[in-house]
Image (spheres, rainbow, N blue to C red):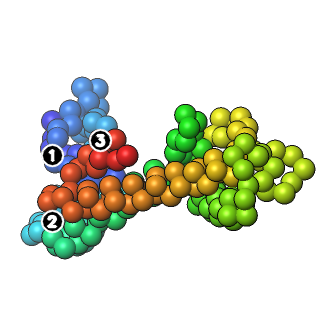
């Protein structure tokens, strides 16, 4: 029996182990898996490691530890929390709103179209468009709007104007709800909960 070196999977010194002498061949030792019959590794003084390359020992310095990320300041944490609330507000504003029992898209492009249609409806009302007149826009077909479920809703000028007001009210309600959440101290971690939003 003799003492030999045990290596890890990468060839680094992992400790000592023993090899048994062959009963049939005196002086021949059976090395355990992952071990070598090498001289003792060099003495180490720090976190460096000794690695056997098959012929000699090499001292391998450890990789430098990355600098820890500094903890954000209170002001930075507040700014991050407010930005997260803004993102949730914008996400909600980009979904749908309800008008007269139906849901309608209110993303940026949809809101621009709604605002434009409501403005035209206001002009038409000022020019005398009567309630129930579905061709107030001057077209050859009834004025319709596509709901979020892909169904069509006919609207006279008064309905379209109210539709635009509902979209604007939805925007305003979310903006003020977001402001209320951002004014809380601390800003709640569950700011995405529906209870904080219209």
Residue 16 badge: 1
Could you say which quadrant of the image residue 87 lies in? bottom left
* Secondary element at tag 3: helix
Write down the quadrant of residue 49 in the picture: bottom left
Q: Picture coordinates of residue 45 (x, y %)?
A: 9, 69
Q: Residue furthest right?
A: 140
CA–CA distance in space, label 2 to label 1: 19 Å
Q: CA distance from mark 3 to mark 2?
A: 54 Å
Question: At 61% across and 54% down in the image, what residue appears?
Answer: 161
Q: Observer-nearest residue: 67 or 119?
A: 119
Query: What residue is shown with label 3?
Result: 195
Viewed as shown, does residue 113 lie left or right of 174? right
Q: Quadrant of residue 81?
A: bottom left
The residue positioned 76% from the left and 46% from the top of the image is 133
Front position among marks 3 and 2: 3
Q: Please report the residue visible at 81 percent of the width from the left and 49 percent of the height from the top.
A: 135
- Left or right? Give the position of 42 relative to 33: left
N-terminal label among 3 and 2: 2
Is 187 located above or below residue 33 in the figure?
below
The residue indicated by pointer 2 is: 47
Mark 2 and mark 1 in contact? Answer it, CB < 8 Å.
Answer: no
Task: Provide residue 54's location: percent of width, then percent of height.
Answer: 36, 58
Residue 33 in sight in this render: yes
Q: Nearer the viewer, residue 7 or 114?
A: 114
The percent coordinates of residue 88 (x first, y second) are: 39, 54
Residues packed near mark 1 inside 10 Å, few (<14), some (14 to 19) or many (20 plus): few
Q: Position of residue 189 (x, y in %)?
A: 23, 50
Residue at screen point 29% across, 41% down: 195
Residue 57 as seen in the image, left or right of residue 111: left
| Label whose residue precedes the other's in the sequence (2 or 1) | 1
């Amino acid at each position: 029996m003799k003492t030999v070196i045990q290596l890890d999977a990468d060839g680094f010194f992992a400790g000592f182990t023993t090899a048994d002498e062959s009963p049939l061949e005196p002086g021949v030792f059976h090395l355990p898996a992952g071990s070598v019959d090498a001289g003792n590794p060099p003495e180490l003084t720090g976190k460096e490691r000794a690695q056997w390359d098959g012929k000699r020992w090499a001292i391998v310095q450890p990789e430098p530890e990355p600098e820890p990320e500094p903890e954000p300041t209170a002001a930075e944490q507040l700014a991050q929390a407010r930005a997260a609330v803004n993102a949730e507000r914008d996400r909600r504003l980009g979904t749908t709103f309800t008008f007269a029992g139906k849901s309608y898209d209110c993303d940026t492009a949809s809101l621009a179209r709604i605002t434009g249609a409501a403005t035209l409806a206001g002009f038409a009302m000022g020019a005398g468009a009567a309630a129930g007149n579905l061709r107030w826009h001057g077209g050859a077909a009834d004025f319709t709007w596509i709901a979020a479920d892909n169904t069509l809703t006919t609207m006279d000028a008064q309905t379209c104007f109210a539709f635009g007001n509902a979209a604007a009210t939805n925007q305003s309600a979310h903006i003020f709800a977001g402001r209320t959440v951002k004014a809380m101290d601390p800003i709640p971690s569950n700011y995405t909960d529906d209870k904080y939003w219209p």
